[in-house]
Amino acid sequence: MPVINRVAEMQDQIAEWRRYLHENPELLYDVHNTSRFVAEKLKSFGCDVVETGIGRTGVVAIIKGNHGDGPVIGFRADMDALPILETSGKPWASKTPGKAHSCGHDGHTAMLLGAAQYLAETRNFKGSVAVIFQPAEEGGAGALAMINDGMMDKFGIKEVYGMHNEPRLPLGNFAIAKGGVMAAADTFEITVSGRGSHAAQPHLSIDPVLAASHIVIALQSLVSRETDPLKSLVVTVASVHGGEASNVIPDFVKLSGTVRTLAPEIRDFAEKRLKEVAEATGIAHNAKAEVTYRRGYPVTFNHDVETDFAASIAGKVAGPKAVDTAMSPHMGAEDFSYMLEKRPGAFIFIGNGDTATLHNAAYDFNDEAIPFGVSYWVTLAETALAA
């Protein structure tokens, strides 16, 4: 089954929704206008249940099929934007300076709304589809908040599927793989304490700038000399703050950064050794390094059976040759990982074509991807819940 004719006819309408959302971006859990827009659309489609306020500002709707009882499967879209000043120059660019849909969540939301409308019209399946609209994917763990509100059990969700656009993937193509497809994301802060002095008398100081510099370099040995080169580890020191004057050695320097991993044992290793290396390097320079390590989103882990199924659905929509079933993992993170820890399912990537990269100020979701994304959701529902 290629792109569904009715879905192709809906493209312009869905693009209008997407562009409205793009013009009106909201951050984290403060997606009140977006949630209201989504809930109103779902009610107008005639969904059987529309519930708001799940995970603070999430929305879930239930669409029952016309062919009797069956399981409930969940489809998830994220709704929040990023704190970025948009430079796309599009007529529908953000109206709110400093906020922009630079990751395509507006497209994800619009495509799932389109699927909800189609499924509510046709209902050619048994059981039910739960369409899940989630806040706070960009660092707020909105998926976990919805889970903690009892979403999975309350709506009886047995399997869960997610989708994300991929700018470097051609339009009409999909990519997926079994196992870890996106990394676990942890953060760390290191405070290096020494003793300040006049910059012209460094011998009277314990220089935290020098110690911090050696810590930055030493941490790279965790990747280059202590990790199997066939396993993935990223350690990035992304922020260095210390001192205010060119002639003063400060009392302390603060470092912060991120650790990305795809395997639990590498994650444990990185947390342990980062602390040890930072502390020991500080001591070697007569300074003190105090480490705060915070675990963030876990690995986005695709389940085997559901991944095969999702790939077969994408193949029905786009053709088998347009589906990469052995994609390389992304070292970015995704809080859909929490849903995949609770239920079997799969996370797939849909081609966005030759556009700016994600989290780039010039990025804009490609509306030509809409028919493929909506057709994927609809075909998945009607196949998984076939009468």
Image (cartoon, rainbow, N blue to C red):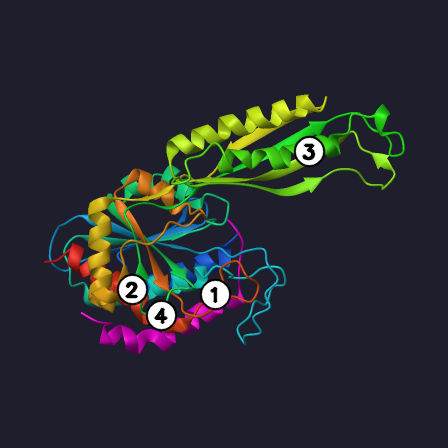
- Whole-angstrom CA distance, mark 2 to mark 1, is 17 Å
Circles 1 and 4, Cβ within 8 Å, touching? The answer is no
Along the viewing direction, whichever of 314 and 34 lies nearer the viewer: 314
Q: Quadrant of the C terminus?
A: bottom left
Report the residue marked by disc 3: 212
**In the rendering, at what x and y percent does residue 327 appear?**
33, 54
Q: Amino acid at mark 3?
A: Ala
Q: Which residue is mark 1?
A: 21
Relative placement, left or right, of 37 versus 30 is: left
What type is the residue that disc 2 sits on? Answer: Ala
Residue found 82% across the figure and 26% down from its top:
205
| Viewer can see residue 339 | yes
**Res 45 seen here:** no
Determine whether the residue tagged by mark 1 lies in a helix, strand or loop.
Answer: helix
The amino acid type found where label 4 is placed reads Leu
Prevailing secondary structure class for the magenta stretch in the rendered image: helix
**According to the image, label 4 marks what residue?**
171
What secondary structure is found at the residue carrying circle 4?
loop
